[in-house]
Image: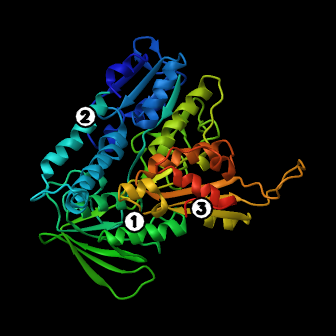
């Protein structure tokens, strides 16, 4: 969002380039927090109703909402721009590179079948990086205390990230040349997305994961099909494997790995290693202990249903509190938190927050997985529909993937109605397809209003569209799909 349009909302944004050392984080807030009681003075006797620490998706959205509600607001950000990790070195630049690398891959492998031919296709990596940087710069121009300082890369014992040979996701977004061999440590959302970028551009990518599966939070059936798809794209996986040694003394990197349960060791060689083992709350240098803010063992700030900490007038949102570390979840936290501060009612339903892996195909989900439903002991039915039977997907020659809907069966109730035995309430939706991240929101809306699969199946969907697959899967849950 442009800075000018933000300023019109009467929220005061204070952004500066500071040292990256923890002591400089958020304007020496370890000192500042100890002085806050009910207000934060920006100049002289001028006080604020709300001070937001951190200008990421959660922070700047909270500041805008607070200003909209008539609260005098200041947002403090250590970077020279707003947007936090997501906009500067996370969500936005990674999606720019995912799109650019996908275009290159399509030009190499798909254009000819559509009658578009080139004598040769080459990667201009500096130009690709410049487009990514342009996307970021375009979007970044764009008393109660709310802590919204986000998260940082989770480090692994014995592995030092130098952002050259051993990189975080930040470094992976700024490589100066395409590595011949890339090893990704961690098979979560970020690792698979970044691995996908460089695999399309020609890197031999190997993903090392301690757990027995990639993306453990994903529905099991979808996950298996997703992994097979990535393997077709020549990504290799070493699951149930741990890294026990790193050697960077040569030109590249040598990793010593062994089975997670112990066993014979092997060596992997790479030009670059991406450490993508998750993220951790970023609260270093805030001095939370000085004012007595409680945290859990993982460093997450503990809050109640109103986002309030145990210290009066101090709130926390986004990645620094329990819950999914997602930019859109942080935004919802920010709005709800400010609504509570303003004396209104705020609410975020974490069971209905969508998640998306932005590979190709994308994988999107909302609600519960089949494994979670089984663990709850709830009787359910599953409706599935493959995109191979979808007209639009076949027309654009991109039909890999499926839609999976999990619906409730035999739910308890206190009102007796003589009708069909099953409630058909939707418990979860999982999509693997081109633009799954866009298709999922019909399902998000359905879950938000506790709809059943029959509700979706009765909605007229335009033809031909990818979204018709969701209607067909809904039909498969309680009846039979039409086009299969």
Q: Is residue 279 visible?
A: no
Q: Which one is earlier in the sequence, the residue at label 1 or at label 2?
A: 2
- How many angstroms separate mark 2 from mark 3 (CA)? 37 Å
Instruction: Give the vertical position of 189 relative to 30 (above or below).
Output: below
The residue identified by callout 1 is 187
- How many angstroms separate mark 1 from mark 2 (CA)? 29 Å
- How many angstroms separate mark 3 from mark 1 (CA)? 18 Å
The spot of residue 251 in percent (x, y) is 11, 69
The spot of residue 22 in percent (x, y) is 33, 44
In the picture, the quarter occupied by the N terminus is: top left
Q: Secondary structure at mark 1?
A: loop
Instruction: Give the vertical position of 26 relative to 351 (above or below).
Output: above
In the picture, the quarter occupied by the C terminus is: bottom right
Instruction: Give the vertical position of 74 relative to 113 (above or below).
Output: above
Question: Would residue 19 be found to the left or right of residue 412 on screen?
Answer: left
Q: How many marks?
A: 3
The spot of residue 177 in percent (x, y) is 14, 58
Which numbered disc covers residue 137?
Answer: 2
Q: Which one is earlier in the sequence, the residue at label 2 or at label 3?
A: 2
* CA neighbours of label 3 inside 10 A, class few (<14), some (14 to 19), many (20+): many
Q: Closest to the observer: 26 or 105?
A: 105
Instruction: Say which residue appears at 23% left-offset and 43% top-offset.
Output: 132
The residue identified by callout 3 is 369
Instruction: Say which residue appears at 36% left-offset and 39% top-offset.
Output: 84
Q: Secondary structure at mark 2?
A: helix
Question: Would residue 470 be found to the left or right of residue 108 on screen?
Answer: right
């Amino acid at each position: 969002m442009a800075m000018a349009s933000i300023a019109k909302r009467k929220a005061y944004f204070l952004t500066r380039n500071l040292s990256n050392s923890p002591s400089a984080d958020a304007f020496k807030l370890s000192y500042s927090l100890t002085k806050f009681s009910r207000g934060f003075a920006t100049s002289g006797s001028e006080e604020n109703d709300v001070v937001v620490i951190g200008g990421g998706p959660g922070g700047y959205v909270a500041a805008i909402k607070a200003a909209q509600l008539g609260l005098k607001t200041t947002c403090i950000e250590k970077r020279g721009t707003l947007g936090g990790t997501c906009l500067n070195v996370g969500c936005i630049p990674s999606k720019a590179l995912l799109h650019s690398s996908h275009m290159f891959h399509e030009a190499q492998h798909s254009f000819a079948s559509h009658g578009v031919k080139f004598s040769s296709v080459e990667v201009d990596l500096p130009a690709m990086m410049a487009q990514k940087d342009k996307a970021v710069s375009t979007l970044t121009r764009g008393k109660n205390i709310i802590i919204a300082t986000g998260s940082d890369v989770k480090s692994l014992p014995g592995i030092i990230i130098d952002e050259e040979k051993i990189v975080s996701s930040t470094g992976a977004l700024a490589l100066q040349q395409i590595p011949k061999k890339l090893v990704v440590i961690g098979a979560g959302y970020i690792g698979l997305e970044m691995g996908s970028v460089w695999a399309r551009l020609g890197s031999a990518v190997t993903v090392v994961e301690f757990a027995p599966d990639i993306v453990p939070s994903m529905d099991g059936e979808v996950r298996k099909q997703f992994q097979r798809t990535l393997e077709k794209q020549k990504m290799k996986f070493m699951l149930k494997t741990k890294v026990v040694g790193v050697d960077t003394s040569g030109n590249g990197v040598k990793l010593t790995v062994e089975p997670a349960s112990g066993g014979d060791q092997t060596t992997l060689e790479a030009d670059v290693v991406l450490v993508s083992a998750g993220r951790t709350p970023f609260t270093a240098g805030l001095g939370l202990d000085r004012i007595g803010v409680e945290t859990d063992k993982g460093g997450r700030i503990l809050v109640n249903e109103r986002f309030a900490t145990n210290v009066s007038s101090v709130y926390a949102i986004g990645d620094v509190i329990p819950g999914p570390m997602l930019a859109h979840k942080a935004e919802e936290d920010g709005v709800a938190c400010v609504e509570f501060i303003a004396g209104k009612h705020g609410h975020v339903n974490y069971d209905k927050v969508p998640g998306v892996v932005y590979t190709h195909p994308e994988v999107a989900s909302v609600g519960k997985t089949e494994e979670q439903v089984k663990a709850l002991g709830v009787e359910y039915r599953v409706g599935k529909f493959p995109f191979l039977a979808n007209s639009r997907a076949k027309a654009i020659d991109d039909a890999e993937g499926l839609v999976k809907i999990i619906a409730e069966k035999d739910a308890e109730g206190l009102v007796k109605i003589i009708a069909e035995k099953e409630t058909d309430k939707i418990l979860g939706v999982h999509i693997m397809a081109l633009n799954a991240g866009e298709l999922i929101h019909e399902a998000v809306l359905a879950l938000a209003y506790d709809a059943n699969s029959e509700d979706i199946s009765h909605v007229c969907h335009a033809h031909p569209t990818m979204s018709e697959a969701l209607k067909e899967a809904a039909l498969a849950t309680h009846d039979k799909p039409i086009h299969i």
